Image (cartoon, grey):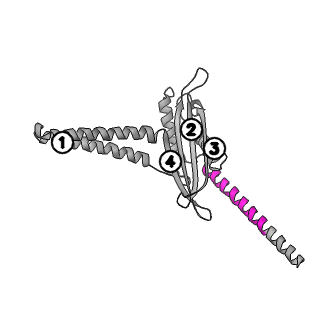
Amino acid sequence: MATRNRKSDTANGESSGATKELDSQTDLSVEGTIAAALAPSQVERDEVKVNNASATEMKHACDDALKRFLSRPELFKQIYTHTDVRLALGWASVFVAAGTGLYGWKVDFERSKPVVWAGVILYMILTSLQTLYAYFIEGDIVFVGKRKTFDKRIVTERITLTSATKPSTPSTPPAYALTVSYVRSTSGGKSLLGRGRAATERGYNAFFDERGVMDQAAFERWVGQLVGRVMESKAE
């Protein structure tokens, strides 16, 4: 009986070791897939050239390059919720203004005053909501992406990136500051599998030469390394 139990324990140990080895190989495979997907694109790009004396132009160029890089099919599907909300509020205010103006033009002034006043107030409310939404909710967010993968279950990954320009100092040039937040969940977001967050910055002179031409490969490599570190839960 003791011999039989020892054989059973040995078999269980071998099975457990094989399972751990398989899980380790799976983790390495996943990390390898992430690293490959986050490598700079090999597709020929159009030249991006800006006025390198303008930090605003360089930031917009970096934001656009970031969106192009992360919204590739093998990475994330971009979510346009913030843009959609701002556009909806903007178009609603335009329609209210146009309708109010048309009504005031067709109807006698005295009779149209209540409706015109209501239109003006509604227009002010809509434009104020648009401004408040952009400032307090959207903020510095430049990219929100989501993707679904299958790892014995459906896993949802969501990533949010915010950017800002760090002003220059007597000893440093203006810098592009980037913050990445990452959430990995399952069961429709009810079960949290992991999260990560990291922030870094780099001078614009690392991505733009003296003519204002952007080194897109270098920028993508920098962004890919940061995003990969967060996705592999190595961010502090």
Task: Please tell me how crowded label 1 is: few (under 14), some (14-19), or many (20+) other residues with Cα within 10 Å.
Answer: few
- Tag 1: amino acid: Val
* Alpha-carbon span between mark 2 and mark 4: 13 Å
- Answer left or right for 34 relative to 9: left
**Toward which corner of the image does residue 121 lie, by quadrant?**
top left
- Which numbered tag is attached to residue 115? 1
Q: Position of residue 52 (x, y in %)?
A: 51, 28
Q: Nearer the viewer, mark 4 or mark 3?
A: 4
Marks 2 and 4 in Cβ contact (< 8 Å): no
**Viewport quadrant of the N terminus:** bottom right
Return the disc, 1 or 3, that comes first in the chain's sequence: 1
Q: Position of residue 116 (x, y in %)?
A: 19, 39
Residue beneath disc 3: 225
Mark 4: secondary structure: strand
Q: Nearer the viewer, mark 1 or mark 3?
A: 1
Vertical placement of residue 182 versus 199, above or below: below
The residue at the far top in this view is: 170
Residue beneath disc 2: 178
Residue 119 in the magenta stretch? The answer is no
- Tag 2: amino acid: Leu
- Answer left or right for 134 relative to 44: left
